[in-house]
Amino acid sequence: MVTVMVAHLGRTTLFLLGEMGRMLLFLAATIAWFTRPPLRPFQILKQLHFIGFKSSFVVVLTAAFTGMVLGLQGYYSLRKFGAEAALGSAVALSMIRELGPVLAALMVTARAGSAMTAEIGIMRITEQIDALDTMAINPLQYLVSPKLVAGLIGVPLLVAIFDVVGIYGGYLVGVELLGVNAGSYWSSIESAVEWKDVYGGILKSISFGLIVSWVCCYKGYYTRMSAEGLGTATTEAVVLTSVLILVWDYFLTSVLL
Amino acid sequence: MIKLVGVEKTLGGQPVLRGVDLEIPPGKLTTIIGRSGEGKSVLLKHMIGLFKPDRGEVWVDDVEISRLKGTALNDARKRFAMLFQGAALFDSLTVFDNVAFPLREKLGLSESDVKRRVGEKLDQVGLTGMGHKFPAELSGGMKKRAGLARALVMEPEILLIDEPTTGLDPLMAKTIHDLIVAMHKTFGFTAVMVSHEIPEIFAISDWVAILKEGKIAAMAPSQEFQQTTDPGILEFISVGGTVALVHAVREG
């Protein structure tokens, strides 16, 4: 019994290590192919439109309600200490340092990441990726690297939008509904938010953008050759990306603090 | 010439190719036949480097394609084109853009040249006026034609064809076979086709190779197969339901 358990543990560990190695090689190969001509700016713009612009509605919606909830909760907590005037800084710091990058990345994962996995996975199953290979066009260069670059550019831009909309959401509830002084709201933000907060948020959003594109493309690229396999790959992509975002967020926060 | 030497491949723990030795004559249409799941498509994909052999070598003239990687492999593939079993058209592109894809990506031609060459190829495969359609709007036969047009638009030296008639009715299968033969005669490329269309392939192929139990059991000009008295080969070709052909062969 113990032998079986140890053997199972060993097999699982080896599989996970192998999978991590394959994922890193996939990333390294994609970066290597990206540096070779042609650059394909049109493909990058197309992906930026898909990952960035087409995710903007859901990001704005999430940001608005997150900011509004923060306004409500923040007001409730701060009022206990008579510190309602600090509502702006509470909302802004939460948004810029933490909620903006994490929630925007999770929304992009759900909307664009899953679609990336499905798109590449279907191309794999229907031999479209093999067709690219036979035309002497590297699929990593043609398909994956534009998505990787678009993730690196698109997610930070979405996070910036998320932060701004979230702060305005907090303003709407805190100032317009609950009566916090507008001047206090904005001035507390101005005095509390430092460059390192913004810088940390940008760094997080760039790394989350990389994680979303990398993991979702990898899962699609190596999907099993069946409809069920593609479904599993899409689920795994969303779950693994979300978990990695949260775990990486903790490590990055502990380093940046 | 494409040459495979002792190619072995195991997939999912199952040995598929167990030492394939095969030489494809240049400029001829060679068909590889074999039972379903025998590894015909796997063998074909070894020729263009989509699969790497576990053991053995794959040569294209003096280049060992099975050892190439990255840009060297891409360079070697420029001599090839492949028609896939399901045509493998890019479903987000129209037929025109599918055929134009390799021209735009690899040759950087002007749009007027692209239009002219794509138009020529669509005419040759009988898809005149269908360029605006998306793959999802095409029938199985039309997809194969579009795939063939895309494969031929770069004027390859070697064309690999994977089960071109799968899923087609007999009439459409014959049309596709005729089209392949006509294109082969017109352009003179080396063609390697994988098929289980027995006996039709004997009429259209220059050479036929039989893949059996992971090895090439026989390879000869197609006329020689029609004169064979080898019971192993006769048994094999009768598996395709061609009892009449087998009787005809036996009767000389």
Image (cartoon, coloured by chain):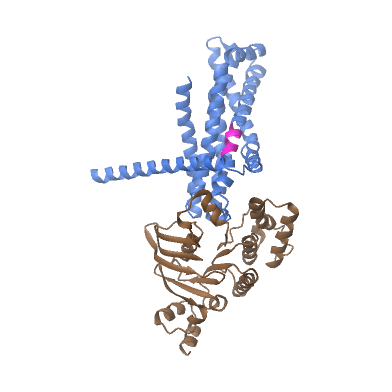
Chain colours: A blue, B brown
Q: Quadrant of residue A186?
A: top right
Which residue appears farthest toward the right when viewing the image? B112
Residue, far bottom: B251
Residue nearest the viewer, comparing B250 with A233: B250
Q: Main secondary structure of the magenta part?
A: helix
- Residue A126: in sight, yes or no? no
Residue at 66% x, 11% y is A183
Which residue is at 43% across, 79% downward?
Answer: B233
Q: Residue at x 49, y 33 (%)?
A: A245
Residue A84 belongs to magenta span: no
Considering depth in this image, is A184 or B134 the residue closer to the camera?
B134
Rendered view: B239 above or below A250: below
Q: Quadrant of the N terminus of chain A?
A: top left
Counting from the top left corner in percent of width and height, residue B151 is at 61, 61
Residue A19 at x, y = what percent?
41, 43
Res B218 quadrant in image = bottom left
- The image quarter containing residue A8 is top left
- Residue B146: x and y in percent read 65, 62
| Residue B168 visible within the image | yes
The answer to whether residue A89 is above or below residue B89 is above
In the image, taking residue B37 as reference, residue B27 lies left or right, namely: right
List x then y, in percent, for residue A2: 24, 43
Q: Which residues are magenta?
A: A148-155
